[in-house]
Each structure stands twice: as C-alpha cells, then as structure tokens.
C-alpha cells in the first residue's frame, strides 16, 4: 500500500496562513497540520481547526520564531526573541542552548496546544530544529511525558538524480543521527519524507509526478499553503497561495485516486 500524510506546517503563524491551511483541508488533499503554540492564538481560526475532525494536529516545536513562553536565557537574543533560523542552527550545532530550558519551552508549547483543546498525534520542528544534536533527545523525553508516539523524520531522498541543496544535505545528516535517538525511544516516523526540495509545491505537474511515483509504505509530504498577507509579511506570500491552489487542484486529487494512494495521518502510522 501507498500511504500519504500531507502535513501543513505553521498553523497559527498568522491569520492568512491558518485560513489557507483550513481551506486546504476542506478542498484539497491536506490531512494534517502542525501548530506554532508559542504565538498568541487567533480565536476564529483555532475554533475552526477544532471543528474539523478530518484534520489531524501536531505541535510545531519552535525555537526560531517569536518569543518563548518560558524565560530561558539561552533561548533568546537581547530583545527577548528566539534567534533567527541560521543563528539558532549555529547555536544548536555548537551546544549553546541549555537543554533544560529547551525542554521547559517544549513542554509549555505542548501544554498550550492541549489547553486549547487540540489532540496531538505527532510533533515536528520549526526549521527542523527538533533533529539537532541534544535537542532530539529532549524531544523524546517530552513525547514520553505526553504519550505522543510519532515524530517527523525529515530525511528527503533525491529524486531523478537531483543534487541535494546545502540545506537538504545538512538536515538529512542530522535526521540520520536523530533516527537512532527516535528509534531507541520507540517513536514512529514515516518511511519517506518530501517537501524540502521536491516536489515543487506550487507546480501542479510536479505534484502529480510525485504522486504517480510515490513509493510503497508511509510517506510524509511537508507543505506550507496559505493566503497572501500584508506586504510587510514575509511568511504569507503569493507563493503560499499558489501552493494552496496546487494542493486543491482537481488533477492532484485525480492522481491520488488513479494511483490508489491512501491519504492518512500520523495516527494511522502509530496504529501500524
């Protein structure tokens, strides 16, 4: 069987992104979303998320956007914000985070999700921070505390001889090391992962090609649909809206049916 989890990252990053994710769940192939829980809740979109039983939820563990819920000194810059992605990655690779502070923050983010009424099926990381050295061990401790059984393993294989990007190569290396940690903790993860480089999520032909060549087993496709936000918003752009249209395109849905692909969530992976 070919099982496909289609997960939208970044629910709650802003209203436009959240509304796009909700639309994609209702009109497209989306099965799951992961939620940024350190940011203030937008009551309207949270209420609608809770009303969609077909859309599974996870926590998008975050050390790179906004401010922390807790007060860990090693988590923030001089303005009290999380470090931006590149700095956060450097700090994680150099062991400059206090892992007890990371643990406290991740617990607080999961508690925020649970208090809001969300049932969490898995976790992943904003900018894949959850697979960095030491942090992946913290993730296993936190998931054990909350009996969450699944985690994203963002190891993307090259397709058709494509050369790995620098980012893809780094994350693949870290994911390969995190795999051992996750496996020792008896966590479930998919057999395959895509969405970093391939397919092109704003290209219908690329997504159809991906579906037609989906491997047997469980695959996660990471995506970032949304609507266009204000001009000063670098996160919710035309690219996000194009991605939303692609995920909702009739040709994509037809390819799913023609190839006998089963759309599932991480809950199916855990039951397996």
Image: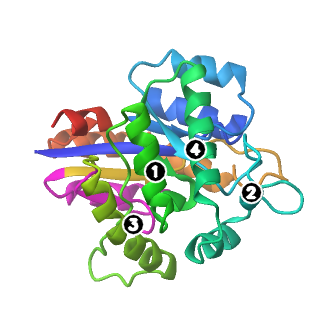
The residue singled out by tag 3 in the image is: 198
The residue singled out by tag 4 in the image is: 106
How would you rate the neighbour count of disc 2 (Cα within 10 Å): few for under 14, some for 14-19, many for 20 or more? many
Write the start and end of the magenta stretch as one range.
189-217
| Comparing labels 2 and 1, the label whose residue is closer to the camera | 1
- Which secondary structure, mark 4? helix
**Which callout, 2 or 1, points at the residue further toward the start of the chain?**
2
**Which callout, 2 or 3, points at the residue further toward the start of the chain?**
2
| Comparing labels 4 and 3, the label whose residue is closer to the camera | 4
Q: Is residue 93 left or right of residue 246?
A: right
Q: Are marks 3 and 1 in contact (CB under 8 Å)?
A: no
Residue 99 image label: none
Task: State how far apart marks 3 and 1 are (Cα).
Answer: 26 Å
**Which callout, 3 or 1, points at the residue further toward the start of the chain?**
1
- Which secondary structure, mark 3? loop
Residue 82 image label: 2
**Which callout, 4 or 2, points at the residue further toward the start of the chain?**
2
Which residue occupies the foreground of this view, 228 or 104? 104
Task: State how far apart marks 2 and 3 are (Cα).
Answer: 29 Å
Screen quadrant of the N terminus? top left
Residue 139 image label: 1
Q: Is residue 84 left or right of residue 108?
A: right
Q: Is residue 202 magenta?
A: yes
Residue at 24 percent of width and 37 percent of height: 270
How would you rate the neighbour count of disc 3 (Cα within 10 Å): few for under 14, some for 14-19, many for 20 or more? some
Q: Are marks 4 and 3 in contact (CB under 8 Å)?
A: no
Which residue occupies the foreground of this view, 17 or 106? 106
């Amino acid at each position: 069987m070919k099982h496909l989890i289609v997960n939208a990252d970044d629910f709650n990053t802003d209203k436009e992104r959240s509304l796009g994710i909700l639309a994609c769940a209702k009109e497209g192939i989306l099965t799951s979303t992961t939620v940024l829980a350190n940011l203030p809740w937008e009551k309207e979109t949270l209420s609608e998320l809770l009303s969609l039983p077909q859309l599974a939820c996870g926590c998008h563990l975050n050390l790179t956007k906004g401010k922390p819920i807790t007060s860990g000194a090693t988590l923030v810059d001089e303005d009290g914000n999380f470090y931006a992605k590149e700095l956060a990655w450097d700090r994680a690779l150099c062991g400059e985070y206090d892992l007890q502070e990371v643990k406290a923050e991740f617990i607080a983010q999961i508690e925020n999700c649970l208090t809001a009424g969300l049932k969490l099926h898995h976790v992943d990381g904003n900018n894949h921070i959850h697979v960095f050295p030491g942090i992946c061990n913290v993730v296993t401790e936190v998931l054990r505390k909350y009996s969450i059984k699944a985690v994203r393993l963002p190891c993307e294989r090259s397709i058709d001889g494509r050369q790995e990007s620098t980012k893809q190569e780094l994350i693949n290396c870290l994911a390969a090391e995190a795999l051992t940690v996750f496996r020792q903790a008896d966590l479930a993860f998919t057999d395959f992962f895509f969405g970093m480089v391939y397919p092109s999520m704003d290209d219908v032909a690329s997504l159809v090609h991906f579906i037609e060549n989906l491997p047997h087993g469980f695959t996660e496709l990471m995506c970032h649909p949304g609507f266009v936000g204000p001009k000063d918003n670098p996160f919710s752009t035309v690219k996000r809206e194009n991605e939303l249209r692609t995920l909702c395109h009739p040709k994509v849905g037809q390819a799913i049916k023609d190839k006998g692909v089963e759309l599932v969530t991480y809950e199916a992976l855990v039951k397996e």
